Image (spheres, rainbow, N blue to C red):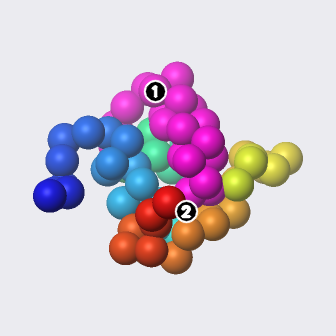
Amino acid sequence: GQTDSDDPYEQAVAVVLRDKKASTSYIQRRLQIGYNRAASIMERMEHEGIVGPANHAGKREILVESQNQHDE
């Protein structure tokens, strides 16, 4: 079963879906991780279709409603 794991990626997804804020700097602050780590997490979210590409301001559109509906 999926639990609230210690995986920073899982935590980041949960934060994005809960707070409706998908930016690298926001993930950095919430998870207290480095910029490179946060950026790679955001890229993975984009790759998996959770968020859209970053716009000029670094903000991303959130493409899924909640984790429950995220299945292939």
Q: Nearer the viewer, residue 13 or 33?
A: 13
Inspect the magenta stretch and tell me whether residue 11 lies in it. Answer: no
- Is mark 2 in CB contact (under 8 Å) with mark 1? no
As drawn, is 47 to the left or to the right of 28?
right
Mark 1: few, some, or many residues within 10 Å (few <14, many ≥20)?
A: some
The residue positioned farthest toward the front in the image shown: 72
Q: Which residue is mark 1?
A: 37
Q: Toward which corner of the image does residue 63 lie, by quadrant?
A: bottom right
Inspect the magenta stretch and tell me whether residue 34 lies in it. Answer: yes
Secondary structure category for the residue under label 2: loop
Q: Toward which corner of the image does residue 9 lie, by quadrant?
A: top left
Q: Which residue is mark 2?
A: 21
- Determine the main secondary structure of the stretch shown in magenta: helix
Q: Residue at x 19, y 41 (%)?
A: 6
Q: Residue at x 56, y 32 (%)?
A: 39
As drawn, is 31 to the left or to the right of 69?
left
Image: 1 above or below 69: above
Q: Toward which corner of the image does residue 25 lie, by quadrant?
A: top right
Residue 40: image x %, image y %? Answer: 53, 30
Image: 58 above or below 60: above
Secondary structure category for the residue under label 1: helix
Three-letter code, disc 1: Arg
Three-letter code, disc 2: Lys
The answer to whether one can see residue 24 in this image is: no
Image: 13 above or below 9: below
- The residue segment tinted magenta is 31-51
Image: 2 above or below 25: below
Q: Residue at x 56, y 57 (%)?
A: 50
Q: Residue at x 74, y 47 (%)?
A: 54
The answer to whether one can see residue 65 in this image is: yes
First in sequence: mark 2 vs mark 1 = 2
